[in-house]
Amino acid sequence: MASYRKLKKGAKKAGKFELLKAALAAPVPGQAPATKRLTLPVGVPGVNLKPVVREVPADEPPALPLNKDLNVIGKRVRRLDARQKVTGQARYTYDVHLPGMLYARMHRSPHPHARIRAVDSSAAERYTGVQGVYLIQKVMGTAVEVRDPQHANPKVGPEPTGSQFPVIRYVGQPIAAVAATSQQAADEAARLIRVEYEVLPFVVDLEQARQPNAPLVFGGRRVNQNETAGGGGADAALPQQGNVRGPNPGGTRGDAAKGLQEAEVIVEGEYRTQVQTHCPLETHGVVADWKPEGLTVYISTQHVSGARNEFAELFSLPASNVRVITEFMGGGFGAKYGAGNYGVAATNLSKQTGRPVRLMLDRREEHLAEGNRPSSLQRLRIGAKKDGTLTVLEQTAYGSAGVGLGAGVGWIAVEMYQTCPNTKVAQYDVLTHAGPGAAFRAPGAPQGAFALEQLIDELAERVGQDALALRDKIDASEMRRLQRQIGAEKVGWKQLRKAPGASPGPVKRGIGVAQSEWGRYMAQGVGVEVRIHRDGSVALMSAVQDLGTGTRTILAQVVAEELGLQPADITVRIGDSLHPPGPPSGGSMTTPSITPPARNATYKAGQQLLALAAPVLGVAPSELLFQSGRIVVQGNPAKSLSFKEAAAKLPTDQISALAERKDNYGTMFGRSGGVQFAEVSVDTETGYVKVERVVAVHDCGRPLNPLQLESQINGGVIQGVSWALYENRHMDRNYGYMMNANLDQYKILGAREVPQIEIHLVEEYTATSSTDALGIAESANVATAAAVANAVYNAIGVRIRELPITPQRILQALSAQTKATGRL
């Protein structure tokens, strides 16, 4: 300790903390070295693959061979839980039935803005079967008043109301909850609650909310720092005037004025995107079971460990006394984090009644209160030389996440074409009296790409270049250059690309392209435990949850590859906070976060088993390897033990190993992306748009399971086409409520409208972890709507700058063109 203090003091005096870090990391005589050097592949096989040396932790496994040389990883493995899901054996939150369980329903506000004067729950309390009533009250200065509107009352500046109840700021805001012996009784009792309101002025339209005289959503400054929509624009230090917060200038670089002076060609446009609500198959829901010894919560969540921590904080419990379980979940798209208002209500009712309480939201509640992709109004201007070289890009964006923040359009406009030396960005949040936005599959990026990629196409037309040729010139990404080449060949770009509107007949056809970009993220400190039992069975445990992407299967593949087994041989236990902490399923970070510790823990456990097998086979452990269910001597495969025979020699019931996700191997992740091509047909007599085909070319590091990756890309494309053509939240400006809060009038892409989707994966090695795996979910969704919009323009020769691209907008655009040109 004394030497440490001396070293620290000297380092501080010298002003070189790096010296201290290096000294502390230096190996101690007699101890094993902390790191080792590995030669790993970097690049794309057949294109630019090369070896690179990385300094990695000494206890990590050797370099994993390329996919072509592996037995399980990189192969099309069917999901291990497929049978459970299709037969109904998989247990979702809705399927949890505990002894004595009660059923709950929330009472929600019918007004977009009001003060609560009084609440009368007496009729509900007297209703047959009712066991408890919980009122959501304003508790200033406690843990209840934290996070975003989905989770509890948002923190705002001073706003005295003279009431113990929160101010109502959107239709559907929860006020109370009732628990009863049946769902029918809970539903009826919730309707019996009487609330006396003082109805206040409101605004639900983005442009009206920006006006100086607009009704204020928050009487004080909105200080909640959580970006509930995730798209940027919610920085805590941003100024706020009325309902408008910002601007966030992130991404600004160079001198925009100079770039405009240098420009020989300028293109600009205004673009609008609509609100898209989260519509997962499984609505938000929870079963809360409060016991004297602790709280157990079954919840559909994208972050088991995070939900456990939030429940512990909200109810002042040690984290060790809270258990969160998510066995299966039916999607989330970014909206299912934390305890939620429904989770708080169910837990309070369970605590009050001493019985488990189930609270599942219905579809209307899901639309109103549990998240959406914010709207956007974007003004974009690009300056360039006559040869297409970019000189400036200016972006001003307004977005509304309702009572939430984070309604920016991301930074794709300034990140994707970094050859542009001058950029000027201003992104604003506009608060409205509507349900809060939430992170939604690549938050902000689809909106940003819809505007950017159309304007890039316009620039290509102005300078007389092909849309792909211009991108080759202004896009520095070698990966996307390769993806454009692959996609152009697969889709038949040269054969299908015609002059805009040149397709003959009333049903015109067109083709368009757009690009995507998304950050590569991972969570450190998350962990995995792997156990090898004496009977030869193998189990993996982690609190990571399976959002529906196939996490169980890829974890089994990683373990099986390391031990020479098959995925079906591995038992995967996830979705339980009793296991080592897992990462959130968001931002495409699950796979790069959890598969490296899965492999590392398996390697450690495997080394223990090899040490037991070595004396039996008369060789050193280093001479053994796992192969096809056996432990074999290298160079002499006839000399071997079966995996089960080796496990039977365990001196205890099991051996186990833990590993946690550490930092990358001495390098940053970089970014993932993709290029999508869309073919459309447009009936100019009816305005009907049909997306016929989408060719999607994407990278995601080392593909662990191409079958599941293709499923993710399929989902991203389908969701993108649905947003481009159909989905739209319709708000009544006179009453402030959502008019289509259902799955009848809220239109979603149906089976007959799904295009033919062709997927091409680019295998890439980054030498960043022991698995080199990355995510795909976000980038698969970013480019689709933009590609569709560009294809529609190619078909009819008229730009549609507002989503969704409905028949009405098509016909209006064609009519306006006819009036302007005098030609049909």
Image (cartoon, rainbow, N blue to C red):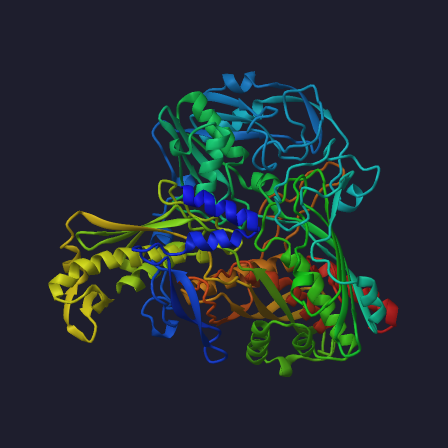
Residue at 56% of width from left, 74% of height from top? 483
Question: Residue 43 placed where, x, y %?
Answer: 48, 73
How far across and down, in percent of the image, does residue 778 sit? Answer: 55, 58
Residue at 71 percent of width and 27 percent of height: 158
Is 38 placed left or right of 666 in the picture?
A: left
**Image side of residue 406 versus residue 278, left or right:** right
Question: Which is more toward the observer, 747 or 35?
Answer: 35
Above-or-below relation of 312 to 446: above
Work out whether 275 lies above or below 392: above
- Foreground pick, 658 / 429: 658
> Which picture quadrant has residue 720?
bottom right
**Does residue 339 appear anywhere in the picture?**
yes
Rendered location of residue 57, percent (x, y) = 38, 59
Q: Residue at x 48, y 30 (%)?
A: 346
Place of residue 430 in the rendered image (x, y in percent of width and height, measured from the top left): 73, 44
Q: Which is nearer the eye, 368 or 576? A: 576
Can I make out residue 685 in this image? no
From this view, report whether residue 581 is shown above or below residue 221: below
Q: Quadrant of the N terminus?
A: top left
